[in-house]
Amino acid sequence: MLNKDVQAILSDENKKAATRTAYGEKIAELGELNKDIVVLDCDLSKSTMTSVFAKKFPDRFFDMGIAEANMMSVAAGLATTGKIPFASTFAVFATKRVADQISSSIAYPGLNVKICATHAGLSVGEDGATHQAIEDVAIMRAIPGITVLSPCDGTETGKIIEYAASHYGPYYIRLTRSNIPVIFNDNYKFELGRGTKILEGPKATLVSTGFMTHIALQAARELSDEGIELDFINMPSIKPLDEELVLESAGKTRLVVTVEDHNIIGGLGSAVCELLSEKMPVKVIRMGVMDKFGASGEPMELIKAYGFDKESIKDKIKSLVK
Amino acid sequence: MDAEMKKMLEGKAEDIRVDIIDMLCESGSGHPGGSLSMADIFSYLYFSGSLNIDPENPRMEDRDRVVLSKGHACPVLYATLAEKGFFEKSHLKTLRKFGSILQGHPDMKKVPGVEMSTGSLGQGLSAAVGMAMGLRLDKKDAHVFAILGDGECDEGQIWEAAMAAAHYELGNLIGILDRNGLQIDGFTKDVMNTEPMIDKWLSFGWHVIEIDAHNFDEIESAISQAKEVKNAPVMIVANSVKGKGVSFMENECGWHGKAPSLEEAEKAKSEIAG
């Protein structure tokens, strides 16, 4: 299932791709197979990569202009006629700006709309705080009936888009701007509510999602060289969470660290805490954005400055397992 | 319109108004003003044969769709759908009660004939735009009707949808604007002036027809004209009286969202029947 061994995955020579690019290619491919797929965008198709679909299927692509609220409710209307709308824009606009449209027009009636939001998290980089969604997962998780997914590489993105296109209901899919190494090969199978344990070890459970998975994986790999062996879990399915996998691992290690490119309030870390506090109270440390707004800078520079880069993860785990 | 048809439509509008009063009196809360203002238009839409709908087959593919964007006026929609046979009239007495299919604002998953869940203002017109796009992609002849409030036009999303409908030349979309001049806090001209309303829709690229919302001949003529417009959305600006048919409710913003007492309901119904 892994593309190569972990070291090779993380090497500079390995293929890299932004998950938004994988989305753009996959939706254009699926458009061929399923004529009910339509795509909407808010004047960002060249950034969200829906432009690939737009070029191929101009009749089924709707540029809605810079009007996100309208786009979400229009997508809902399209869904009532049997279409499968994929609605894309940046994650800040696809969630914070239109939380009510998503809740009232899409989630309450349970319509088959797929919100594919790109440019999530601090890893957006230079555009700064107004364009870095750090609350999007929290907002989407809190709306009843929405499936929240966060792929960690191009392969997982493709599989998740295929899954969403063929399963009825509202989905929020969180995609990134920056390039990420390809972690999984094509044998990887996405299952809703399932994560993947990539490394195994007794000392702690490290859970990550999306953009942070390749970074957290590298931290786990380097820690194992230092004799600190961890369970490393990639969690694309944030809602529903893979409860079984987290409980099994936490029961063994009794120490859980979560890492995400998102506010520590309301995202993956919160989901893991909610599960464990009810079913298996163990210590959980949440790493991510510590309830602060982002800033301009290079993606890796920001993640380091906000304290959840590879070295910060390693230091935190070392301090906890001593 | 011949006299027989007009008499029938007047009778249906009267039944709808009586049901609105009864439902609201029973529920003890809800929105009479903007429901009564639309009773004649709903009577025309559902009972003149102008809509292609089938109560026995509410999800029929080729059907025309009605989206009540001003979702709080759902008593007029519920009363009309029940009268048309989409569901048993006995449900009307359960309005706003726990376990009822008739929620305080329309729920498309619960009520046959409700095409879109609405209530948060400004969103229904956008949903109607999406429906019109979807039907056109499938080369269906059906029309989508969106019922808007004039207070609702305060919402920016209405104008986002207005732009999109004109941009995509949605000739299968017909808006009906309940221009009753009132909203919760008072007259629309005082709360938030939306005038010049007709110029606004024209400038957004819509075909506009202005009518008296309580004149069946004008309603009929507007809807048949609207159906002939093929390359642009149409807004029927329907000048209405909020609370129409009940003297003490007419043009009173206090009756936007207040249920009548038993005594008030009896008085209202005698006026409607009178």
Image (tube, coloured by chain):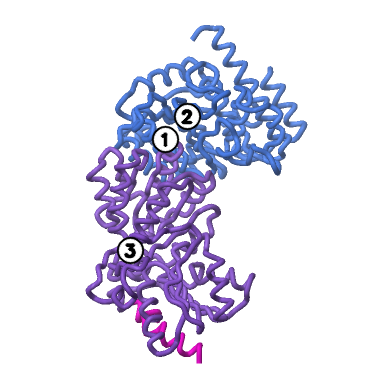
Chain colours: A purple, B blue
Residue neighbourhood size for the residue with mark 1, other residues' Cα within 10 Å, grouped as few (<14), some (14–19), many (≥20): many
| Label 2 residue SS | strand
| Label 3 residue SS | loop
Which image quarter: residue B114? top right
Circles 2 and 1, Cβ within 8 Å, touching? The answer is: yes
Q: CA distance from mark 3 to mark 2?
A: 46 Å
Q: CA distance from mark 3 to mark 1?
A: 39 Å
Could you say where residue A85 lies in the image, as x and y percent from the top left? 39, 44
Could you say where residue B70 lies in the image, as x and y percent from the top left? 52, 38
Residue identifier under label 2: B65
**Residue A43 appears in the figure:** yes
User: Which chain is indicated by disc 3?
Assistant: A
Residue segment shown in magenta? A302-322
Q: CA distance from mark 2 to mark 1?
A: 8 Å
* Residue A318: in magenta span: yes
> Which residue type does callout 3 highlight?
Asn
Report the residue that reaches farthest toward the top.
Answer: B3
Q: Indicate which label's residue lies in the foreground, 3 or 1.
A: 3
Q: Nearer the viewer, residue B78 or B273?
A: B78
Report the residue that reaches farthest toward the right.
Answer: B263
Which image quarter: residue B95? top right
Residue identifier under label 3: A185
| Label 1 residue SS | helix
- Tell me the residue at 35%/81% (across/down): A304
Could you say where residue A145 lies in the image, as x and y percent from the top left? 54, 52
Circles 3 and 1, Cβ within 8 Å, touching? The answer is: no
Could you say where residue A252 lies in the image, as x and y percent from the top left? 56, 79
Tell me: residue B64, above or below residue A266. above
The tag on residue B131 is 1
- Residue A116 in the figure: left or right of residue A238: left
Q: Nearer the viewer, residue B30 or B123?
A: B123
